[in-house]
Amino acid sequence: MAFATLGLGMFRDHKSNQELARINEQNLSLREWIGPREVNKNALKASVGDLGGFAMEIVQLPNVIDGEPIAKAMFDALQEVGWNVALKSPQNSSIEELRATASIIKNPRGMILVFYPGFDRKPEFKTLMRALQAFAVDAHSSKEVGRLSVGQLRVLVAQKDR
């Protein structure tokens, strides 16, 4: 009789552990969907560090809840590996200027690397895009990139794409 009770207890613990694992998995999915995005600076530095020095502008669009830490982490990581990087944000640029920058893409969502047509044919750009895609950065070619403060690339940090 004691064996049967012990067996039932083990079964309950196993079922409980399975249920707990399922709930934790759902919580992680919800956090990814509604929670703030994060950029692992060390992982970004490791993935782009060998590419040589690109020059780019990172633009944090206004009213993006998690925009500041993402833009700042990207800026810091790229600057630490020797890139020429500029950061535009609501703290150092006018809202009108930031909105004008964002207007090149209708309803921007997520993080978008904007570049001039033809730039994507450069081998180093393809390597850069592969590295940035791991951080959920999409690419968009546009003749309307506008005047950049540095380089030929601009990353827009917009509202999270759900």
Image (tube, rainbow, N blue to C red):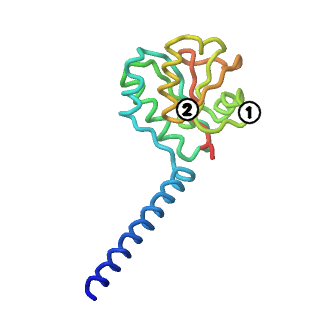
Number of the label disc, if any, that sits on residue 106 = 1
Q: Nearer the viewer, residue 130 or 160?
A: 130
Q: Residue at x 67, y 31 (%)?
A: 102
Q: CA distance from mark 1 to mark 2?
A: 17 Å
Q: Residue at x 64, y 32 (%)?
A: 98
Above or below — where is 160 with respect to 92? below
Q: Residue at x 53, y 28 (%)?
A: 58
Name the quadrant of the N terminus: bottom left
Q: Residue furthest right?
A: 106
Which residue type does callout 1 highlight?
Lys
Position of residue 161 in the picture relative to residue 40 (left or right): right
Which residue type does callout 2 highlight?
Val
Within the image, what quadrant is residue 13 found in?
A: bottom left
Residue on which the image places disc 2: 137
Above or below — where is 20 with respect to 37? below
Q: Nearer the viewer, residue 91 or 20?
A: 20
Q: Nearer the viewer, residue 142 or 100?
A: 142
Mark 2: secondary structure: strand
Position of residue 101 in the picture relative to residue 46 (left or right): right
In the image, residue 115 lies at what x, y percent?
62, 19
In the image, residue 109 lies at what x, y percent?
64, 38
Number of the label disc, if any, that sits on residue 53 = none
Mark 1 closeness class: few <14, some 14–19, many ≥20 residues within 10 Å = few
Mark 1: secondary structure: loop
